[in-house]
Amino acid sequence: MTTTINPLESQELAAPVRWRTPGMLTAFALAAGCAFVFFQRPGTTTFRLSSENDAIRLPNLEVSTVPAGVGLTIALLLLAGYSVFLRSSGRKTPRWLIAVFAVLLVAGFLIWAGSGGTLPVSGLLVATLGVSVPLILGSLSGVISERVGVVNVAIEGQFLAGAFAAAVVASVTGNVIAGLAAAMIAGALVAAVLALFAIRYLVDQVIVGVVLNVLVTGLTTFLFTQVLSPNNQQLNSPPRFAPIDIPVLSDIPIIGQVLFSQTLIVYLMFVAVAAVYYGLFHTRWGLRLRAVGEHPQAADTVGIAVNATRVRNVLLGGVVAGLGGSYFTLGSVGSFNIQMTAGAGFIALAAVIFGRWDPVRSTMAALLFGFASSLQYVLSIMGSQVPSEFMLMLPYLVTILAVAGFAGKMRGPAAAGKPYTTA
Amino acid sequence: MSSNLTSDTTRSASTEQQAPTNSPSQPQAKTTPGKWRTVLREISNGNTIINIFSVIIALAAGAILIGLTDEEVRESFGYFFARPTDALRAFWDAVAGAYSALFQGAIYNFGRPGFLNGIKPLTDTLTYATPLITAGLGVGLAFRSGLFNIGGRGQMLIAAGCAGWIGFGIQLPWGIHMIVAVVAGIAGGALWGGLAGLLKARSGAHEVITTIMLNYVAFYLLSYLLRTPLLQAPGQSNSKSAPTAETAVLPSLLGERYTLHFGFILAILATIGAAWLISRSSLGFRFRAVGENPHAARVAGINVGKTYVMAMLVSGGLLGLAGSFQVLGTTTSGFTPGIDAGIGFDAITVALLGRSRPWGIFAAGLLFGAFKSGGFAMQAAQGIPADIVVVIQALIVLLIAAPPLVRAIFRLPHDGSKLTDSKKVATA
């Protein structure tokens, strides 16, 4: 019942899919070509690069859809062809090629879908980051926890607990920082239960995680209906974090407002990504953590306390996920609501696996999901012809395609999901 | 329920080293003692006691929650040291009121005249249990094959769409119509589940990711179809389908007075079928072999990828059956995208509580059905949110999975068989 994939399994199943990347690229290029060339949407798409209040204003970028579509189709086909050529001469498709391909594909899609409208580039990016912040923090929590050998399916529960605690404590104290602290403690509490059952009582980690999600959902819903909603004014009207402009940096065109005019939680998120990346791969803490997750017996032999390391880092993961939960109440919405995380914890879990248990790649995966989510939002505002339900499906379809098409079989930390018992 | 989750985990950890000794066809199985001996041994081994104590602890925790969040209790706690009896009485009143409403809503209502009226809650319990059992079987079967099917929601929604479309979109004679609709539902669920299995077998995409994502895709797909003439009721402006045709509605078992429908019989048959499939068929053997150790299964010549696809097809089919019960039995007046009613997720807890064994799941489904039926009654009668039931259920599953914790709380002696179990792991 463990969710990790074992190395042996991956060797055999990975064999028949060697042509996958070139194949996928060709398929995407052809599909895009069909859309851009045969289902032309003549007109111009305007990209708004800066808003009225920006210090440095850039002119709008106007693109004529038909020539741009044809040009991009040719470029995409060339890239796919080069990938096929590389493959047939026995070489792998380089990563930069996939990245360039993806950027061109998205650009082409935006130009095509946004025909006749104005697309706020900065708004799209702000929305992307807004959706991604909790996902990134949740996936960091998952990365820490799974790298140390404990599968963390309870991210959703940690989010909800964090969001709930942040809303209540910030409302009672009137202090956002207190709310933030409460969220972290709540996340750590959920993680403590996970650690207790998974490490002390050797219960299957996935089971504990799933049940904890149910438990926290039930608990917060019960307390919300029974206690919070009758006393909404006192208990569920927290103050919210105000955005902080970082001087100079926030004036950079396009990305300035996106990255440097955000709330404290977002800045903490930036710090967390860098810290987890550096800590995991460049410090003694990270080395020990990974050793415990990959080969606990070896780690034990050299004197690392396996279970103590696991407990500490699962708690740390809980703190990070609780921080992510606080974003729901103190960062975006403002008050707690029943099941307000709406499955974000599961998306974060997907980002962990899609990001191959790597903090930076998981962050990218979370950003990809956030981008797809906000894309559907922006396009539906622009008056797209596609039914809204299909646009809402987009982020989930993108994730399936990404996982099935490009990521494929992935190998997680070897000891994740397995309790460590000594003789 | 002879073994518990703890030993399951340790066993799967030890299979890495000594897979052959765990093959299901051990010679020991032939010398199994009689049924009653097994039952007696289980009681003395403490598993039954653990189960009972787990339920007691969970109910006690629920009682504390109900008591502490009660308006009156909190007021009387304000002057606790002046008159402590007030607070304690208010606490007792709140908890007793809640749990008696829960019992009367789940088993027998003493407030109603006559046995036939009083017993109605029990039949409601069975009605609620019907989809929980079938869906739980689906999730449990995937568990046994080493797959974690979180996609119950999507599979049920697609099934509801298929069964519903047959149910009101097509004219067929009574009986045949019903069968065709149920089969369509099963096929829809199997298709959606099999898709996740195929993705796993073909590209190695993790089923946890794909099933979650397919849940959302199914939800939006059904939401869209419910706005189109294909599923939307004529003259409707919101996303709701037409009512299921009389000929396709599952007949009620005990007359019009009760909600219990033929689906319950199908759920029993599904349990028997799943039990046979798991323990007697060669397909079930492959499921279990792959679930225990995919590498060993591959070495033994089992096509692991194909087994994953088959397991997800069967699992999705069972969840599809649960989805068609929703449309053809429970909500026959037309459905919305929320027709799954969270059963796809409840099914996971049901399967865990039943330890992925068909009859264990049956019992767990009955228990959760009782909680569901009682929870709604409690909410209506006492104004206590039914979500407390979710908390109690989760606690039960969590506690049953950790017998040492329950033993520690009640200071029960350690179980001998478990000790040897852990020794085995240590030497492995």
Image (cartoon, rainbow, N blue to C red):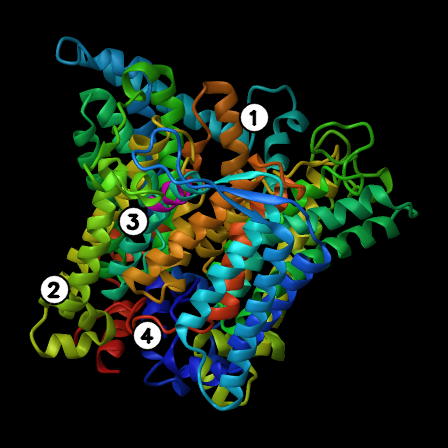
- Callout 4 and callout 2 share a chain: no
Mark 2 residue type: Trp
Tag on residue B109?
Answer: 1
The Cα–Cα distance between marks 3 and 2, rounded to whole angstroms, is 19 Å
- Callout 3 and callout 1 share a chain: no
Q: Secondary structure at mark 3?
A: helix
Residue A197, given in percent of the width and then of the height, sits at 27, 55
Quarter of the image where the N terminus of chain A is located: bottom left
Residue range of the region highlighted in magenta in the rendering: A127-133
* In-image side of B212 versus A179 (left or right): right
Mark 1 residue type: Asn
Chain hosting mark 4: B
The Cα–Cα distance between marks 3 and 1, rounded to whole angstroms, is 49 Å
Front: mark 1 or 2: 2
Mark 4, residue position: B13
Q: Main secondary structure of the magenta part?
A: helix
Q: Residues within 10 Å of mark 1 (few under 14, many from 20)?
A: many
Residue B118, given in percent of the width and then of the height, sits at 61, 26
Q: Quadrant of residue B246?
A: top right
Residue B198, given in percent of the width and then of the height, sits at 59, 70
The Cα–Cα distance between marks 4 and 3, rounded to whole angstroms, is 30 Å
Does the residue at mark 3 contact the one at mark 1 (Cβ under 8 Å)?
no
Whether residue B346 is visible, yes or no, is yes
